[in-house]
Every structure is written in C-alpha cells, then in structure tokens.
Image (tube, helix red, strand yellow):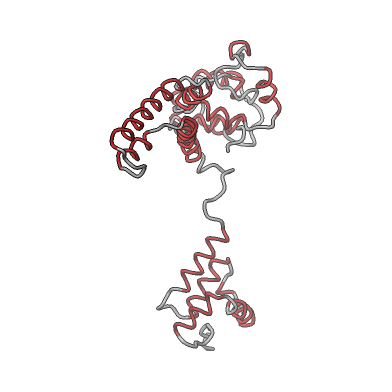
Amino acid sequence: MDVPLKSWEKFKDLRKKRGLTLEQLAEQTRLAASTLGKYESEECKEYSSFCIVTLAQFYGVTADYLLGLTEQENHPNAELLDLHLSDGMIELLRSGEINNALLCEIATHKNFRNLLADIEIYVDRIASIQIDNMNALLATIRAQILSQHQAVDKDLYLRTLDAAFIQEDKYFTHTIHEDLDAILSDIREAHKADVTTADETTIAAKLKQDIEAAANFKDSGPEQQFKFYCTKLGIPYNKLTPEEMNGIMSALKKSKYWRNAQHRRGKSKPPHRKSKQKK
C-alpha cells in the first residue's frame, strides 16, 4: 500500500495525474518551470506562499495538503458530528492500529455501496420473510408431488425443487464475498506498481526459472551455459581468471540443472577462453 506522500511527492503526483509536463504546468500556472521542478525535488525545504496558493487553486486542493499538514485534499475542517462516527470508530482511526488509507480506498470504491447494501439486507434480515415464504411454497409443492405421484427422493423434479430452496446465510455470505472480492481485486491491481508492493516473482524464483531455461537449451554447449549463469549472477565472465572459472564451474556442476543438461549431451569439456597469441 501507499505510504503518506511527502510534499515534494504530492507536487509530482498531482502533476502526473493530470498528464502535464513541467513546461505545460508552468505555462498554465504562469510559474517558472525551474521553480516547479525544484518543488518536486526531495532536497527542497522552502516554498513560496504565492506558488503554494497558486498551485492549490490550480489543482483544487488545500495549501495544507500541499505542505503535508493534512492528507485530506479538500476537506481539512470536516466536523466529526457530520460524519456520524461512533466513539469506537474515532478511537480506532486515531490508534494507528489499522491502515486508514486502505480503509478509505475500500469505502470510496464504486462498488462499496453495493457491498454495504447487501450487508445491511443480511444483518437486518430485510429479505428473510420473502425467502421464508418462497421456501414454504416449495415445500408445499414438494409434499403435494410426493402424496399424489408417490415419487421417490431421487426424482428429477423433486431434486429440482430441492435445489431451488434458498439458504439465507449461504446466499448472502456468498454475495457479500463476491462484492468484497471485486473491490479488493481492483485496489490490488491499482497498487501493482507501488514501491511498497512485493514483486510477483522473487529474485530467487526468477533465477531458478532462468537456470531451468538454460538447462533446456539443447543446442548450447557448456561454455554458453557457463556464460549465461555468470550473467544472471552478476559475475563479469570476461574478467575471470582460469582459477576463478574452475572454482565457479565446480560449484555449478553440483546443480541438478547442470547435470541434467550434461546428461542429455554427453560428457563435455569445461568452458575455456582462447588465449591471445603473442606477437
């Protein structure tokens, strides 16, 4: 998840969101491009009040937001009374024990109202009477079929009626689960490029994939594989001494991928470099 942005990050973030270059922003705000560029630098510690007010008006945010005094872009003085928050909720938000930014993203997602509506229907049992009536009707029809036609429980029509019965708990928990899954999936995708988001493939896993791929190169000899491994491990192949090459080769030969590759091609000589001819 994103961590709170610092002032210089906010200047850059707001500009990027609007798809503007520094030159375009300077032209539209009539501020110097060099000044705007300085504000987006981590080294910048002082800001012109005129520039802050100009940029705040241009972006439609508060000056306090740009200066890092609040994380609220447009509602710095919202009254708690207007928010209808319980004391417990206020204490939780102030405690630092939860990720408030993530909670805000969930609550402001376009599908959150659907999630909350489904939860409210389930918690307040708004649909319970209708579901009970429907199940009662199905039970009556089922009983009539059994009495009139002496059908067995495995009868297709009886099984169809049984499948139509609604189990309220399972139905709504499934619906709520789908609502929440869709919201979390969107938020997860939105944060895919964040610096705080873990890579989909770890370095170790990627190296393992590369080694496996090299082991499957049917037409490559041991020297090509040796170069491949050195590249992936960040070892400068051309600067290795013969002794270093022999040492690394000894270690690589212990890899199951190297042994498998050699087994397919037969016994091969270790990699070597052509020696330069003396003039």
**Where is the N terminus found, in terms of image quarters?**
top right
Horizontally, residue 29 falls left or right of residue 88, namely: left
Is residue 51 placed above or below 10 in the rendered structure?
above
Q: Nearer the viewer, residue 136 or 85?
A: 136
Horizontally, residue 278 falls left or right of residue 20, namely: right
Disc tally is 0
Horizontally, residue 98 falls left or right of residue 169, namely: right
**Residue at left offset 48%, top offset 37%:** 181
Query: Whole-percent x and y of residue 276?
Result: 52, 85
Query: Whole-percent x and y of residue 42?
Result: 62, 36
Query: Whole-percent x and y of residue 187?
Result: 50, 36
**Residue at left offset 31%, top offset 40%:** 151
Q: Nearer the viewer, residue 49 or 74?
A: 74
Is residue 58 placed above or below 245 in the rendered structure?
above
Horizontally, residue 68 falls left or right of residue 276, namely: right
**Residue at left offset 62%, top offset 20%:** 64
- Dividing the picture into quadrants, the one containing residue 102 is top right
Q: Residue furthest left?
A: 149
Query: Whole-percent x and y of residue 26?
Result: 47, 27
